[in-house]
Image (spheres, rainbow, N blue to C red):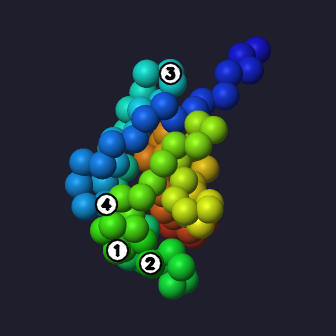
Amino acid sequence: MSTHIIQIISATQIGDYKLCIAFDDGITQEVDFKPFLSAALHPDIRAYLDPQRFASFRIEYGELVWGDYDLCFPIIDLYKNQLEKRSTLEQAA
């Protein structure tokens, strides 16, 4: 049984709200955060639609974070490039 925990080793901004994220197992994902940020109802999340604020991301302990963990995502969601979850009803259809 493997006990390896996947970590992010780098993230590079490649578009207004798009990052190329590299994981320690060699996988990379180009993740577009704009749909998630645009659909957010909370003003603290929508604040990251400001390009300078969005660009302030960093890698901390193998995770991608903004601010004082104001914005962060489960690594598995970034790894699978699935920031937005479809509802249970949509999945059943």
Residue denoted by label 3: 25
Q: Nearer the viewer, mark 2 or mark 4?
A: 2
Q: Nearer the viewer, mark 1 or mark 4?
A: 1
Tell me the CA gap for discs 2 and 4. 13 Å
Q: Secondary structure at mark 1?
A: loop
Residue denoted by label 1: 50
Residue drawn at 44 percent across, 78 percent down: 47
Q: Earlier in the sequence, mark 3 or mark 4?
A: 4
How many marks are shown on the rendered structure? Answer: 4
- Residue 15 left/right relative to 59: left
Amino acid carrying label 3: it is Asp
Residue denoted by label 2: 47
Query: How many other residues sit within 10 Å of disc 2, few (<14), some (14-19) or many (≥20)?
Result: some
Query: How many other residues sit within 10 Å of disc 1, few (<14), some (14-19) or many (≥20)?
Result: few
- Residue 71 in percent (x, y) is at 55, 63
Q: Say which mark, if any, is on residue 17.
A: 4
- Residue 91 in percent (x, y) is at 53, 60
**Pointers 1 and 4 in contact (C-beta within 8 Å):** no
Occupied quadrant, residue 51: bottom left
Q: 92 or 2: nearer the eye? A: 2
| Residue at the extreme top | 1
Residue drawn at 52 percent across, 35 percent down: 8
Q: Earlier in the sequence, mark 1 or mark 4?
A: 4
Amino acid carrying label 4: it is Tyr
Q: Secondary structure at mark 3?
A: loop
Amino acid carrying label 2: it is Ala
Tell me the CA gap for discs 3 and 1. 32 Å
